[in-house]
Image (cartoon, rainbow, N blue to C red):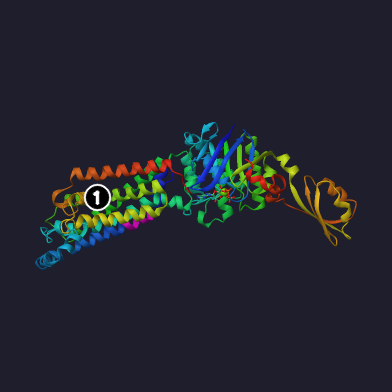
Amino acid sequence: MFRNIFFKTLRDMRVSLFWWTLGMGLMSLYMMTFYPTIQESSAELQEYVDNLPDSMMALFGGQDTIDVSSIEGFLSMELFSFFYPFMTVVFAVMYGAGFIGREEEDGTLDVLLCTPIPRWRVILDKFAALVVFTLGVLAATYAGLIIGGVAVGIDDWDPGILLVGTLNMLPITLFFGALALCLTGIKGGRGLGLGVGFGFAAGSYLIFSLGELADIPRWLQQLSPWYYYRGIDVLYDGMQAGNVALLLGLTAVLVALGIWGFERRDVGV
Amino acid sequence: MIIQTEGLTKYYGKARGIIDVDLLVMEGQIFGFLGPNGAGKSTTIRTLLDFIRPTRGRATVLGLDSHRDMLKIHARVGFVPGELALYPKLTGEQFLHYMANLRGGVDWEFVRELADRLDFELERKIKSYSSGNKQKLGLIQAFMHKPELLILDEPTGGLDPLVRQEFYALLKEAKQAGQTVFLSSHNLPEVERVCDRVGIIREGRLIAVEEVAALKSKALRHLVIVFDGPAPVQDFINLPDVRDVSAVNSHLRCTVAGTLDAVVKQAARHTVVNMISEEPNLEDIFLTFYGKEANHVS
Ligand SMILES: Nc1ncnc2c1ncn2[C@@H]1O[C@H](COP(=O)(O)OP(=O)(O)OP(=O)(O)O)[C@@H](O)[C@H]1O
Ligand SMILES: [Mg+2]
């Protein structure tokens, strides 16, 4: 566990990983067992959804065309459109800002960096630990969905597409984690990474989700990473290679920028 | 040459860190880097290790460029930071394993030996250690890979006298083994005791580099001699290198520059009840020997 920075970072995350997997797993389980009730009262629910103000619908990632009584429609609206990715973005931004930021604020960066480990390695190892952490949480999320679905005997579903929907959260999660990491790499201190990370996640979500209603120009919507996440469509259309590649590409660019900044700046000042 | 800096200068924004520091540390020396709080000791050290980049000037460590060859330098240096911070949730042993793995080539037998000698329990969680024990962990971490150069930023703070002795013994052995030591301190007696050469830094400037012997001859000591009768003030007033002589009843107070020899011999002609020598203070040395202008000398 102390073999290198990657394993040490994972070890530091283990308690947090336990709670996140438990929380997301149980939440998924709960939502799935909730689904049959939804299906029974689907007519009323559809009516309720249809009567929601458009802005509310948009904010919750909904679309008029979604059939909330189908399992895909239900999970898209309730979980994948924004609730779940918001949860994963929370830990991604906190870890992203904390990897360098915490060690620098605590002063432990001095003993870490006086070893013959290059600064870029510190960033890559820690970011790799975030990838594993995210995959762990997503695996528990998916397991919760499947166990819940089997438990209540859902039959008109495709477990494969739920896996796609779950995995689709990986790129957007890593993107915001990389953004926070990049900023602490360049500047130091957690504040900037946390502030901009959460601020941009929320702001860009608003721009994307209210885009059509508020007449926000398309190019502006396209600047929002959420535009490429498409949690509402993924259970119908699958993952779009272009979107995934774009988000992962930007993630790589942000990590590289973070390394570039971290290599050239003073640490612990 | 183990450490060489040329015009090394660091400003933190507009704030002065160090200015034009030209330092030479020879192989196998124990070099003391002496200066009061805020003088620039940590700034110099952190620049040598490439944690911070100089505003001007350059430094080589072990013949390597402090920036370009930073990793090669780190592999061959042991470091105790001035403000030591460790991972509170790890045990001492886990922390040392981590450091040893990141460095490679650490002999665990030697780690145990160091822990024994410093009377350090490896198994406890770091957050439960006292500050002195944390400091020991910092020392073990710096010594454990037998580095060619030890850079120790005020390493003895918080250590009790016994452990301090053991640490001095470790320094001596390191020197015998051919390791070089760069030790910062604001404690003159400590530096006098363990170092071969001393660099004195004040307000960011290196104002003197001396052999320890030379420094000792300049050292100021405050001395109190208690006699069994009224203090014989007259006998002391005209002694060479003795000043500020005053007396209250049987207590004679004076300041001595250099050795105490003359004073002791003079005192021995009377009955001496007690003799107290206060450790010389750094500011005294600055004021007496480098004058108020010291901060303008480069
Ligand atoms: N991060 C920083 N930002 C601004 N000024 C700084 C910073 N770090 C140090 N300084 C300034 O640089 C000068 C030298 O500080 P340094 O920490 O090197 O002193 P020092 O000799 O190590 O002191 P001490 O004995 O207290 O450890 C001080 O005047 C200090 O105020
Ligand atoms: Mg210092």
Which residue in the protein does label 1 denote? A225
What percent of the width, then of the height, locates residue B243? 80, 51
Q: Is residue A74 magenta?
A: no
User: In the depicted view, which residue is nearer to us: A232 or A39?
Assistant: A232
User: In the depicted view, which residue is nearer to us: B100 or A99?
Assistant: A99
Q: Amino acid at mark 1?
A: Pro
Q: Is residue A16 magenta?
A: yes
Please determine whether, in this image, residue B128 is positioned above or below residue B168.
below
Whether residue A197 is visible to the viewer of this picture, yes or no, is yes
Please determine whether, in this image, residue B173 is positioned above or below residue A69.
above
What percent of the width, then of the height, locates residue A228? 21, 49
User: In the depicted view, which residue is nearer to us: B208 or B96?
Assistant: B208
User: In the depicted view, which residue is nearer to us: B153 or A269?
Assistant: A269
Whether residue A145 is visible to the viewer of this picture, yes or no, is no
Prevalent SS, magenta region: helix
In what element is the residue under mark 1?
helix
Residue interval drawn in magenta:
A14-20
Q: Is residue B98 left or right of residue B232?
A: left
Q: Is residue A69 left or right of residue A167?
A: left
Point out the residue furthest to the right here. Answer: B269
Q: Quadrant of residue A64?
A: bottom left
Q: Is residue A243 left or right of residue B163?
A: left
What percent of the width, then of the height, locates residue A225? 24, 50
Q: Quadrant of residue A263?
A: top left
Few, some or many residues within 10 Å of mark 1 (<14, 14–19, 20+): many
